[in-house]
């Protein structure tokens, strides 16, 4: 009996030790992809592309996540037609496809092609009216895209649509000061 108790305690300790380690590995991978996104923002898309290649070579199960990073690189280099071909290769309902859609929509927004941008944004946000996406790559783009889309709708005098999208943005935020700023924008 004492032996069984010691075994159970040892097993529980191993499980408690392994759970944060496994979560830490997932967090480290997410950090790598956020780092790749930051490299692109800072003007180093080639390095982000190399990072994606290394991650895919190291772990082939990350292939789809690396494709999202590669699409982000293509968009930053204004090779939108290639990014759209990548998007077409994914199933329509794939969270990775939605992440690429948001990346393309942001590019069209910056280029002033508002109608293309609106269609892409709307296709993603229609899927997530009731709940937030859970995919880490999609979440990386979701909040900023929702904020941009709500501002775009407000400029077009679609205040009801803008307020609904602001609700989506607000549901993703834990920072109180940013939350207050967005609530003020939503009220306006």
Image (spheres, rainbow, N blue to C red):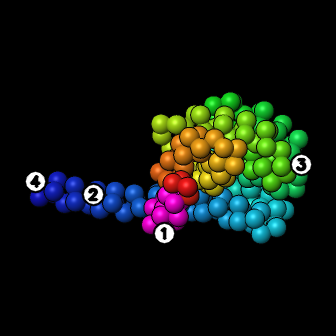
Q: Position of residue 180 (x, y in %)?
A: 48, 64
Label 3, label 1: how many angstroms apart (C-alpha)? 37 Å
Label 1, label 4: how many angstroms apart (C-alpha)? 56 Å
Instruction: Say how many tags the image has.
Output: 4
Name the residue rendered at 64%, 61% in the picture.
34
Return the residue at label 4: 1
Badge 3 local density, few (<14 within 10 Å), some, or many (20+)?
few
* Residue 125 visible here: yes
Name the residue rendered at 87%, 42% in the picture.
82
Return the residue at label 1: 177
Return the residue at label 3: 79
Q: Position of residue 123 (x, y in %)?
A: 66, 34
Label 3, label 2: how many angstroms apart (C-alpha)? 52 Å
Q: Of residues 118 and 53, which is closer to you in this image?
A: 118
Return the residue at label 2: 12
> Of the residues under marks 1 and 4, which one precedes in the sequence?
4
Label 2, label 1: how many angstroms apart (C-alpha)? 41 Å
163 over 33 or under it: above or below: above
> Of the residues under marks 2 and 1, which one precedes in the sequence?
2
């Amino acid at each position: 009996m004492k032996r069984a108790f010691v075994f159970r305690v040892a097993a529980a300790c191993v499980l408690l030790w392994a759970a944060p380690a496994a979560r830490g590995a997932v967090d480290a991978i997410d950090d790598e992809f956020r780092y790749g996104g930051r490299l692109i923002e800072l003007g180093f898309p080639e390095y982000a592309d190399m990072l994606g290649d290394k991650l895919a070579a190291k772990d082939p199960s990350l292939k789809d996540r690396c494709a999202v990073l590669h699409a982000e690189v293509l968009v930053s280099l204004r090779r939108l037609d290639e990014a759209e071909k990548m998007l077409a290769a994914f199933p329509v309902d794939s969270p990775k496809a939605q992440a690429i859609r948001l990346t393309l929509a942001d590019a069209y927004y910056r280029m002033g092609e508002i109608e293309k941008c609106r269609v892409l944004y709307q296709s993603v946000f229609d899927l997530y009216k009731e709940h937030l996406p859970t995919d880490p790559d999609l979440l990386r783009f979701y909040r900023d895209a929702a904020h941009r889309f709500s501002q775009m709708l407000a400029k077009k005098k679609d205040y009801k649509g803008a307020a609904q999208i602001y609700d989506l943005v607000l549901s993703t935020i834990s920072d109180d000061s940013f939350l207050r700023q967005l609530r003020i924008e939503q009220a306006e």
